[in-house]
Image (spheres, grey):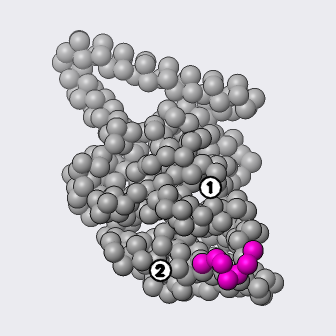
Amino acid sequence: MNDQNVPQVSIIVPCYNEQGTIQLLLDAIYEQDYSRSKIEVIIADGLSTDHTKEEISKFVLSHPDLNIRIIDNPKRIIPAGLNRAIKSAEGDIIIRLDAHSVPEPDYVTLCVSGLEKGKGDNIGGVWDIRPVEDFWQAKSISEAASHKFGVGDASYRYASEPQIVDTVPFGSFYRSLFDKIGLYDETLLTNEDYEFNVRLIKNGGKVWLDPRIRSVYYSRSTFSDLARQYWRYGYWKAQMIRRYPNTLRWRQAVPPLFVLSLGVLILFSVSFHFARILLMFEITIYLCLLLAAGIGVSTKKNNASALIGVPISIAIMHITWGCAFIWGLIKKP
């Protein structure tokens, strides 16, 4: 690739205590088919307490031909880290990645090509979600996180056709876009990507998903970690909906409505027989759907543990997200 014909790219990565996966990300960036001399990597570290910085430093010493910089993120939240990295970036194009992600070798090339062809103002791709450990809970969670019953119509989990979408998990942008619509909102601890894309679309921009742009994303490894993750997602989604109520999608509305319906039916079933019947009917239908998802994954993957693990994972995702969303509407941060 002729260096004179390609734009400078800044890959920005927020991270905190990612010693287990940061090496995988850096290896993947190093193996990109884009000109290495035109890539800089800026890692905004939230004052990690593990060996993340040591792992990065070792990589820098052994790969001197890749420009990698570590900057501190004293606020220790993702949007603040992203903003500090953007302000430090020197590239014409910004590509946001995550310390849990591993981009395919043509990831940068395809992002840059899409931007240059005017496909969108924010261009991203599809997650290939994998377990971080070879453990039944971790494998079940990764299957649930890409199952349509688990995540609804989130196209970036399974899309096979290029399309306009409301968000992509990461993104690539011309640097000038941030001058036009601003940086990431640091009052949102999660959902900063979605909120940024809402502003982009409101300003006439377009979010484009190209399924050829792929990255591996390592999901949570235990049910407790999954519950904490989805509680955080649901709570901060509610805070965003306070500002942009017309951005609520059906996939986001169903879990809190389901939780509310269960609560109402449980309350009324104390006094009304009909409410008890409706409650049992709703629970039975939901359990059947969960079981069907488990059977489908178990059969397809020839994995008996998925029969139980996938339904548990999906139920945790739905219920914790739904409860957190309701709590977020009641209580401001």
Residue 312 visible to an observer of this rendering: no
Find out whether residue 238 is within the magenta segment.
Answer: no
Residue 153 visible to an observer of this rendering: yes
Q: Nearer the viewer, residue 109 or 75?
A: 109
**Left or right: 121 as drawn, with respect to 66:** left
Above-or-below relation of 14 to 196: below
Name which residue type carries label 1.
Ile
Quadrant in which residue 13 is drawn: bottom right
Label annotation for residue 162 = none
Label annotation for residue 213 = 1
Label 2 sits on a secondary structure element that is helix
Label 1 sits on a secondary structure element that is strand
Q: Mark 1, residues whose alpha carbon is within 10 Å: few (<14), some, or many (≥20)?
A: many
Residue at 64% across / 67% down in the picture? 108
From this viewpoint, which residue is outermost toward the right?
62
Q: Are marks 1 and 2 in contact (CB under 8 Å)?
A: no
**Left or right: 184 as drawn, with respect to 123:** left
Q: Position of residue 301 (x, y in %)?
A: 73, 32
**Inter-mark Cα distance, 1 to 2:** 22 Å
